[in-house]
Amino acid sequence: MKSGAATEQTHFVHVTGVLKNKFVEFDYSIGTPTLYVELVLPFKQFRQFCIKHDVKELTIEQQHQVELDKLKWRHGQLD
C-alpha cells in the first residue's frame, strides 16, 4: 500500500556498480537524492523496480551534490 506523500514525490536511482555481471548496485531515494538506501538487485528485477516506482536517474548536478554530501559526512564541513 502506497502512502499519498510518497507517491507525490520523485523517486531516484543512481547506479553505482555491477557485481559479477549479474547484479546492479544502486542508491534509491525518494524526494531528495542525498537521503538514500543502497540496494542490490539482479538486472531483471532492477528494471522492474525502476518501472514500478517510475524512477528518474540522477542528473550530473544531483550526483555531484550527493558526492559532496558524502564528503561532508566523512570529513566535516567543507570550506
Image (spheres, rainbow, N blue to C red):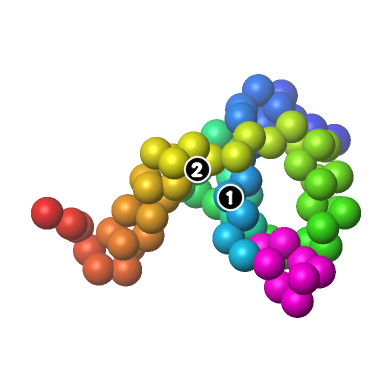
- Residue, disc 2: 33
For the residue pair 70 and 2, the one nearer the viewer reads as 70
Numbered disc 2: secondary structure: loop
Q: Is residue 2 visible?
A: yes
Local packing at callout 1 (Cα closer than 10 Å; few below 14, some 14-19, many 20+) is many
Mark-to-mark CA distance, 1 and 2? 9 Å
Numbered disc 1: secondary structure: strand
Residue extending furthest bottom? 20
- Which residue appears at 77% of the width and 71% of the height? 21
58 vs 4: above or below: below
Tag 1 and tag 2, C-beta contact below 8 Å: yes
- Residue 14 badge: 1
Label 1 is placed on what type of residue? His
- Which residue appears at 86% of the width and 54% of the height? 45
Q: Would you say 66 lies left or right of 19 here?
A: left
Residues in magenta, as a range: 18-25
